[in-house]
């Protein structure tokens, strides 16, 4: 079963997909909300192309696993997206995925380390792989 991981951000939305068996995540791309005013349409187009069975959204929780303002924003965004694509949604705590992505990027060439879209794509991979491993 193919899965799609989504790392919601106010500037960029990182996207990852799994293989057909749902075992391994790979980065797919990023939707830049500033460059693409119709970012929801762009995301739904990608979902239609990739045909995942489930959408997995990273949910940023607070230190005590409580909902935050941004986690409520993610839930609202997920509701809008799923209204258009009619797929099941799962949420997984994304705590520290951005930090882990930054750590992974430290092993890349200096220019690549500054690529924020790469960081968002890696974060989406980490979210999805965490769901695959523990979901």
Image (cartoon, rainbow, N blue to C red):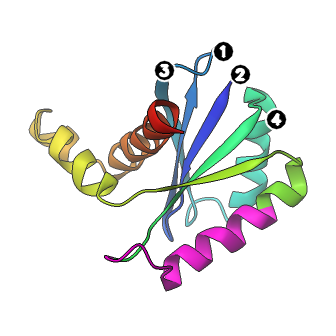
Which residue position is annotated with label 2? 1
Residue 15 or residue 60, whichever sits in front: 60
- What residue is at 11 percent from the left and 41 percent from the top? 106
Q: Residue furthest bottom?
A: 69
Q: What x and y, as percent, mark residue 101?
A: 27, 46
x and y percent of residue 49 in the render? 77, 29
In the drawing, what numbered circle is on residue 20? 1
Q: Which picture quadrant has residue 76?
A: bottom right
Q: Which residue is mark 3?
A: 24
- For label 4, the residue is 48
- Cβ atoms under marks 4 and 3 closer than 8 Å: no
Q: Is residue 7 magenta?
A: no
Residue 52 in view here: yes
In terms of secondary structure, where does tag 4 sit?
helix
Residue 125 vs 101, above or below: the answer is: above
Q: In the structure shown, which secondary structural element does the residue marked by tag 3 occupy?
A: loop
């Amino acid at each position: 079963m193919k899965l799609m991981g989504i790392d919601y951000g106010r500037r960029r939305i990182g996207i990852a997909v799994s293989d057909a068996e749902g075992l391994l995540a790979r980065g797919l791309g990023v939707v830049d909300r500033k460059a693409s005013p119709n970012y929801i349409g762009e995301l739904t187009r990608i979902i239609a192309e990739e045909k995942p069975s489930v959408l997995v959204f990273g949910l940023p929780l607070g230190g005590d696993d409580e909902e935050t303002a941004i986690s409520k924003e993610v839930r609202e965004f997920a509701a809008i997206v799923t209204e258009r694509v009619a797929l099941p949604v799962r949420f997984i705590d994304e705590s520290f995925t951005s930090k882990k992505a930054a750590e992974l990027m430290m092993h890349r060439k200096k220019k690549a380390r500054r690529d924020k879209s790469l960081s968002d794509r890696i974060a989406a991979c980490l979210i999805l792989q965490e769901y695959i491993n523990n979901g």
